[in-house]
Structures are given as structure tokens and as C-alpha cells.
Amino acid sequence: MPDAVIVAVDGMGGDNAPGMIVEGLSLARRRMPDVEFLVFGDESQLRPLIEADTETARACTIRHTADAVSMDDKPTTALRTGKNSSMRLAIDAVDTGEAHAVVSAGNTGALMAMATIVLRTLPGIARPAIASAFPTLRGQTVMLDLGANIECDADSLVQFAVMGEVFARNELGLEQPSIGILNVGVEGLKGNEHVKKAAAILAESPLPIKFHGFVEGDDLSAGTVDVIVTDGFTGNIALKTAEGAVRLFGHYLRESLLSSLRTRLGALIARPALQTMRDRFDPRQYNGAMLVGLNGICIKSHGGTDGVGFANAIVAAVNLVRREFNERIREDLEELIAAEATMEKAAVQ
């Protein structure tokens, strides 16, 4: 574990960059005064913002580049033309060992493509996945993949399960997280061949994994399991549906509370409780999805977040570095691969 964590930051990524980025750096610096930043982007825009706060300026080193990946760029275009972009140079800093982690609020597809090409996947991992935690009735649940892989075979789903289990242990502090595979029903006969095969592998796994079985859509909010595994197509739809449902609920709640003088007075009385609920569902508190499976810590911040959300993404990156997250994944995968080889050898004999 490094004594001082250095985070490479895409200073031009996101809907409100670079102002939102620098605000996030300032907030993160107050929470973690020993962390340093390499900030990549247009120096003429970044420097005045950074130097407005002495403490932030002391923690930041600006690396100038005039190039940036736009939110509309296709991943192939970003790979071809973005070698000097703020996003690519920030990823390169992790690859060369100059930084311990990279955080970007930029184009998700471009970040995934660049990070995969530059950092490569960990041994035993075929595809990286996007993982994040969200609130449930029981606390928090980790879900992956959230959009990196539209289609996944059984082996990829098993790898996601291993990575998600390590993520839950490190980020949620759970001693033995339970794992479920998202399906159209909990019965063993339901689902496509990939999810059924993945479930069979996990049920027979020699790893100390607590495999629950299949879970359904309503189990996401119930917190039935600590880790939910699915393909990126389904996971992204589930995530966006949940986010939309929360916004819809908030809209109608505000509408109802402001509908009359009596409801306004009631809202005033209930304000502390309403604020607690608002904080619990604040997406900024859960901002920062990890691209798990890469040979380096890479965090994707929501492009439309503010400084508070971006600061939380930085904190997530630093915590994963300090907890040696990738080393834990390597250890579990090596154990799984060795056990599978032993089982195959015994079957042949």
C-alpha cells in the first residue's frame, strides 16, 4: 500500500468541467489532506480555478493538454484521435506508475475503451465490468455489470461474481457477502443458458463464496443479496429505471407537500425527516463506479454530478488503492483457477 496516494484526474471530463472538477478536488483535499493530484487538461482554464484555493493548489500538479474527449465521441474515435486528450493522459499516468488511480467524469464508452487498451485486464479476467453500490432496505448492494458488456457468457458472469464479492468486502465492509444472479425468476429452470451455467459454476465453486442463487428485479431494492451479477445490457437498464423511479417519487412528493397551506406546514414540521430521506437517496453519495477487472484503479464519475459527487468518486478511488483492491481480486482468481484445474484433472482421471 502506497504511503501517499496520487490520483490522476481528467480535468476536462464531464458536463460542468473544469469548474466541477476543481470543486471536487478541493472538497476531497479537505477530507484527505495527504492525497495528491495530477490534473490533466487546459492549463489556462484549470490554473485560475485551482490557485483560488491555496490548499488545493498545494496538492495539484497541472499537466497541460488542449485535447479533450467530448461526451459525443464514439469509443473508436476517441481511441484513434484522443491519444493526447486529458482522459488518455490521465489513464497513461496509472499505466506508467506515476499515479495510483484515475478518475474521470467523461465519456463512459471512451473511458472503458481507453482504460482497457492501456491498463489491460487482470490475469484471468476476460472483460472488465462497471460496478457500483446503491441503497437498499438492508443497507447497500453492489451491482455489476452496469453497462460495459452488452452480452456476457457464463465465464464472464462468474468473474463478475468474484470481483463483486471482493468489491463488497472492501467497500461495504462485509465479511462474507451474499451473491445473486439477476434473472426472470428464482427457479433453477428459468433464464438463458449463460445464467444457468454461471449459477451452476458458482454453486459448486471451491471458493468461500456465499452464493444465494437467482434474484429478480424487486430484489434490487429489497437488498436480498449483497452482490447482484448481470450482463451490462440488463444492468444498465435496471440502474436507469431505478434512478428514474427515485426522481418520479421525489417529483410527486414535492408536488404533494406544496399542494396546500396545510401540507406546507406539515412539510415544515417533517423537514428533518425529509432531509434524512433526501440524503439517503442523494446520488452524489454513491457517485463513482469502478471499472473492475483492469490492471489499475479506474473510477467513472457521473458526467452530470457536482463537486460533492466528484469528491466522493475521488474518495472511492483512494479507498480502493489503500485497501489493495486489485490484489484481493488476483488472490481470489488464482484460487478459483487452481481449483478448477484440479477439478478438471480429477474428472479426466
Image: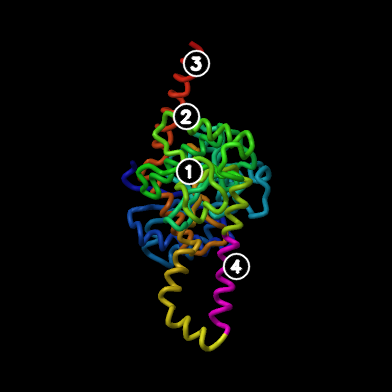
Q: At label 3, which amino acid type do we have?
A: Ala
- Magenta-span inclusion, residue 249: yes
Q: Secondary structure at mark 2?
A: loop
Q: Residue at x 53, y 80 (%)?
A: 257
The mark that comes first in sequence, 2 or 1, is 1
Question: Mark on residue 248?
Answer: 4
CA distance separating discs 1 and 4: 41 Å
Q: At label 1, which amino acid type do we have?
A: Ala
Q: At label 4, which amino acid type do we have?
A: Leu
CA distance separating discs 3 and 2: 14 Å
| Residue labelled with disc 1 | 93
The location of residue 209, given as percent across then percent down, is: 42, 36
Near mark 1 (Cα within 10 A), the count class, few <14, some 14-19 or many ≥20, is many
Q: At label 2, which amino acid type do we have?
A: Glu
Viewer-nearest of discs 2 and 4? 2
Magenta-colored segment: predominant secondary structure = helix
Question: Mark on residue 347?
Answer: 3
Considering the image in quadrants, where does the N terminus appear? Answer: top left
CA distance separating discs 3 and 4: 54 Å
Does the image show residue 184?
A: yes
Near mark 3 (Cα within 10 A), the count class, few <14, some 14-19 or many ≥20, is few
Front-lying residue, 10 or 220: 220
Does the image show residue 63?
A: no
The location of residue 40, given as percent across then percent down, is: 51, 52
In magenta, the rendered stretch is 243-259
